[in-house]
Image (spheres, rainbow, N blue to C red):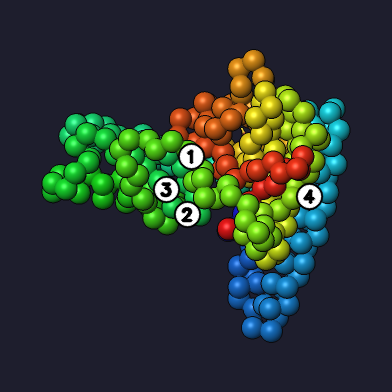
């Protein structure tokens, strides 16, 4: 049974009333899926199309509900509580409204291999996961090119790839953390900013000190990005509008100018507001985008 199938067949009734339990509903979906799989091709195609259409309606409705709830303070509180409910979390994950949390999954997997690494004088640190690639730093005996270090690296790679569905490969980063600097070249606005991927985001005056603004940008090539522009003591920074925890939006993140932090409203991950470094989960990081202020307007490079 896939989660999508479970959700698609779930009738529109509360699991808290006297109706069937979630487990009963999941079982019914299982049976329906098996029955559909046994159909002749044309009938199965129709059933699959129906499933896709129903899921599409559910997703559209859920996205609207989440957007409307996020927009109202009281409803937002309730939404945060609902996300912690396992069934709601499953529903949101299935429809791509929240991501499963691969960092947590991966760290759980690494906890299992860590004793073996440490018994050989090595260790591993998960830095981030991007597009299926887990970036790790290896320490001690895991580093170098001896047979044992290669064996330990293979152990880490195998554990992550087999233990976390969303990880397809592992990249080893240099031992010393490299600062998250944006190359100077990428900050230069040339004679044709649009061709270079720069998009005018908003007037700088709309992001006063201690505030953040969420904007949806479209580069001339069509690439779209949801971005937040953060102002801490008049230093502006742009990030992809996705928390490193579960990818939820940071529109309503809280900025603490005294500490220079930005806190995700969903589960409280706390970031250094000017570097994007996560202070709650070492190694996690907001994705920073090149930003320039030109003639009172904030430009963000999203196209390249
Ligand atoms: S999405 Fe969980 S802390 Fe941000």
Tell which circle, 4 or 3, labels the residue nearer the N-terminal end. 4
Residue 26 appears in the picture as rendered: no
Front-most of residues 97 and 37: 97
Closest to the camera, between mark 2 and mark 1, is: 1
State the mark number for residue 181: 1
Q: Position of residue 21 (x, y in %)?
A: 71, 43
> Pointer 3 and pointer 1: residues touching (CB < 8 Å)?
no
For marks 2 and 4, give the CA distance. Answer: 25 Å
Q: Is residue 142 visible?
A: yes
Apparent side of residue 239 relative to residue 120 in the rendered image (left or right)? right
Q: CA distance from mark 3 to mark 1?
A: 20 Å
Viewer-nearest of discs 2 and 4 = 2
| Front position in the image: 248 or 232 | 232
Tag 4 residue:
63
Asked where in the image residue 65 lies, by quadrant, the reply is top right
Q: Dot 2: within a 10 Å radius of its alpha carbon, few (fewer than 14), some, or many (20 or more) residues?
A: some
Name the image quarter holding residue 210: top right
Residue ID at (58%, 47%): 187
Q: In the image, residue 45 lies at what x, y percent?
A: 68, 78
Q: Which mark is residue 134?
A: 3
Q: Check residue 132 in the rendering and tell me which mark sits there, or answer none.
A: 2
CA neighbours of label 3 inside 10 A, class few (<14), some (14 to 19), many (20+): many
Q: Earlier in the sequence, mark 2 or mark 1?
A: 2
Q: Is residue 75 above or below residue 55?
A: above
């Amino acid at each position: 049974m896939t989660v999508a199938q479970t959700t698609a067949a779930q009738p529109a009734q509360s699991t808290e009333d006297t109706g069937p339990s979630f487990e009963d509903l999941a079982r019914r979906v299982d049976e329906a899926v098996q029955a559909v799989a046994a159909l002749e091709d044309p009938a199965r195609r129709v059933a699959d199309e129906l499933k896709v259409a129903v899921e599409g309606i559910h997703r559209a409705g859920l996205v609207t509900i989440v957007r409307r709830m996020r927009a109202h303070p009281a409803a937002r509180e309730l939404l945060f509580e609902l996300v912690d409910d396992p069934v709601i979390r499953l529903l949101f994950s299935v429809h791509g409204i929240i991501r499963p949390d691969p960092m947590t999954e991966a760290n759980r997997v690494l906890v299992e291999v860590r004793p073996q690494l440490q018994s050989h004088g090595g260790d591993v640190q998960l830095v981030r996961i991007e597009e299926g690639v887990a970036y790790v730093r290896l320490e001690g005996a895991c580093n170098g090119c001896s047979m044992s270090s290669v064996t330990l690296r293979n152990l880490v790679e195998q554990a992550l790839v087999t233990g976390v569905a969303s990880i397809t490969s592992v990249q080893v980063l240099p031992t010393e953390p490299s600062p998250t600097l944006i190359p100077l070249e990428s900050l230069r606005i040339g004679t044709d900013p649009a061709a270079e991927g720069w998009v005018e985001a908003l007037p700088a005056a709309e992001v006063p000190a201690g505030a953040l603004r969420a904007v949806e940008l479209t580069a001339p090539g069509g690439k779209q990005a949801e971005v937040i522009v953060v102002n801490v003591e008049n230093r502006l920074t742009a990030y992809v509008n996705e928390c490193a925890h579960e990818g939820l939006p940071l529109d309503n993140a809280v900025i603490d100018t005294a500490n220079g932090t930005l806190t995700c409203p969903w589960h409280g991950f706390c970031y250094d507001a000017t570097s994007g470094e996560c202070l709650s989960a070492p190694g996690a990081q907001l994705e920073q985008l090149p930003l320039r202020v030109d003639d009172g307007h904030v430009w963000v490079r999203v196209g390249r």
